[in-house]
Image: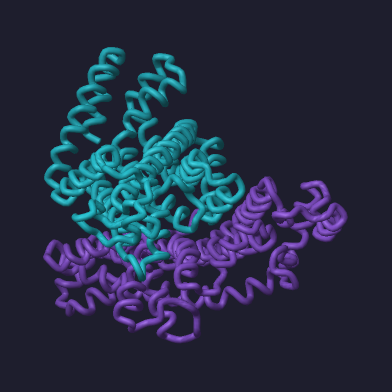
Amino acid sequence: MARMKMAGDALANDPFAAAFATQDIQGRSLWIDAWHRLLKNRAAVASGSTMFLMVLAVVFGPMLSPWAPDFTDWEHTASPPSLVNGHWFGTDAVGRDILVRTLEGGRISLLVGLVATLVSLVIGVSYGSVAGYYGGVTDRMMMRIVDIIYALPFMFFVILLMVVFGRHIILIFVAIGAVNWLDMARIVRGQTLGLKNTEFVEAAQACGVSDKAIIVRHIVPNLLGVVMVYVTLTIPHVILVESFLSFLGLGVQEPMSSWGALVNDGAQDMESSPWTLIFPATFLAVTLYCFNYIGDGMRDALDPKDRV
Amino acid sequence: MKQTGLGHHFASRLLSLVPTLLMLITIAFFLIRVAPGGPFDTEKPLPQEIRANLDAKYHLDEPLLQQYFRYMGQIVTLDFGPSYQYKDWTVNELIASGFPASLAIGGTAMLLAFVMGTLIGVIAAIRQNTAVDYSIMGMAMMGISIPNFVVAPLLILVLAVYAGWLPAGGWEWSFRHMLLPVITLALPVIAYIARLTRGSMIEVLHSNYIRTARAKGLPERIVLGRHAMKPALLPVISYMGPATAGLITGSVVIERIYSIPGLGSYFVQGALNRDYTLVMGVVIFYGVIIILMNFIVDMLYAWLNPKIRFDEG
């Protein structure tokens, strides 16, 4: 708050120079500040490092593996984890290597997490900032719509969407993203309401900057902190939804795979070959766990007053 | 004054249920109707005449809008129509046959989650920043992070397959058969409620009136039980709405894993078979439960929270 005040004072003297200069300085100090606080949070740092390794493994692992994800090793079907035959995580009933399949599935799961979050980010931020900035009847109408959609059992709608339009990967991105923007819109709107009465927005209005430019150049950049926190918390949620769909057999389809689909496969064979369940399940759980901790840490770092 | 205010709030919230319900039914209806492929698309196409007769019987040959209004008229009388796939069954009958099992598991899970979650949360709050607190919160984070379709097979593997203590699936009205599904379903909700309770309890314990209560020399038990508990539970109350939605969604998976003949399994089957009427019936039925639960929670919250006054209303 104090920082915002300072920015406002500077703007009163020279709006144009200040709009560029202070925004830059303010942004950097806020981020560095938050970064230091984040680094002090041991759980978040450990989670961040784990996720970094996970991303590396998922991206480069399949290239380094001697096995292709769809290669069926008939000599070693349903082999338990073994260093001798080269299947470190074992193989499934048709001899596919679990390690490379888990990494390959991780690509899809993480990709869905990122892209669907991006979709919800774009919709949520534009919707929320417009509603908050214009206020009045527009705001009331727009938020009323959000309230109504919010009350709907949207998981069922995602399932319906998948059934109706087939299980295309693009559709998974869009469907999951399209139902996850509501929280983002609410949060962004709340923040925008506070921002639009600040002096620097007033100054921009006085200079005759268009509404669109004010939202894009002045409002949205100042929302980034809150939005980042929420993005980190949305990613695990989205990965979870995708796995849920894939587990029901409604998500990604063969030969593509995701952690949810692998857990589903593994659960079918778990009595005879439990490793087909345990490895993908562990990867999925560790990822979700880490993302939640990073999100928590970022919330504490960027927004110390609003912790649960 | 407060009473009339609450009544006004009640009425306006009750009115706002109508557009929500309307939207629920409309989206469900059109979403499933734009689907390529219909309920009578079999691998071998049916003869023209039979197909035409079937379509006529279920009014599928009418214009979409007419079907929509026909369906709306039907819904008002609480009639979800016949199922397309389960011949000789109406959707109402299917819901009536599947819901008891789902309700038993979901209701028990909800109760368990509320009791356990608040208890654990309060313990963590009292022991804030100790090893107890950290381990409880670490476990709660695990409960939130690990999806129940991962927990369920692992529990089955350990407790049913290896140890052989509990049945791996199937459904009977018995404690042994309900234990695993209920625990699996409740775990994430317990974890979430524990986190909520801890957070609000810590905040409440730092407030002035708790300091006053302690300064008066009240025993800690009374301070916690009588003074701190009620305000600390408010966030938990308002979470009960989303929790219901979460439990219902979770039950779709849980019922499949433990092969429980509940509504969730009907829903997945119906969706895969394009059994329009069944799917819509379940979506609307569950949607209404979620919407009503949100409404009840909202009212309860307003009633319990002395900070919300409706004098202006």
Looking at the image, residue B103 sits to the left or right of residue B77; the answer is left
Left/right placement of residue B42 relative to residue A31 reads: right
Q: Quadrant of residue B74?
A: bottom right
Q: Is residue B98 above or below residue A52?
A: below
Placement of B171 over or under B264, stated as above or below = below
Residue A14 sits in quarter:
top left
At x 59%, y 74%, the residue is B98
The N terminus of chain A sits in image quarter: top left
Residue farthest to the front? A75
Query: Viewed as shown, does residue B248 lie left or right of A165?
Result: left
Residue B36: image x %, image y %?
67, 46
Q: Closer to the camera, B82 or B248?
A: B82
Assign the C terminus of chain A to one quadrant of the image. Answer: bottom left
The answer to whether residue B21 is seen in the rendering is yes
Residue A207 x, y percent position in the rendering:
39, 14
Q: Is residue B305 visible?
A: no
Q: Report the coloring of the rendering.
A: by chain
Q: Colour of chain A?
A: cyan
- Residue A199 lies, with reference to residue B275, above or below; the image says above
User: Which chain: purple?
Assistant: B
Q: In the figure, is residue A156 to the left or right of B63? A: left
Q: Nearer the viewer, residue A128 or B232?
A: A128
- Residue A181 x/y as whole percent: 45, 43
Front in this rendered view, residue B311 or A308: A308
Residue B91 horizontal/vertical position (percent):
69, 68
Residue drawn at x 70%, y 64% as measured from the top left = B85
Query: What residue is at 22 percent from the left and 41 percent from the top?
Result: A52
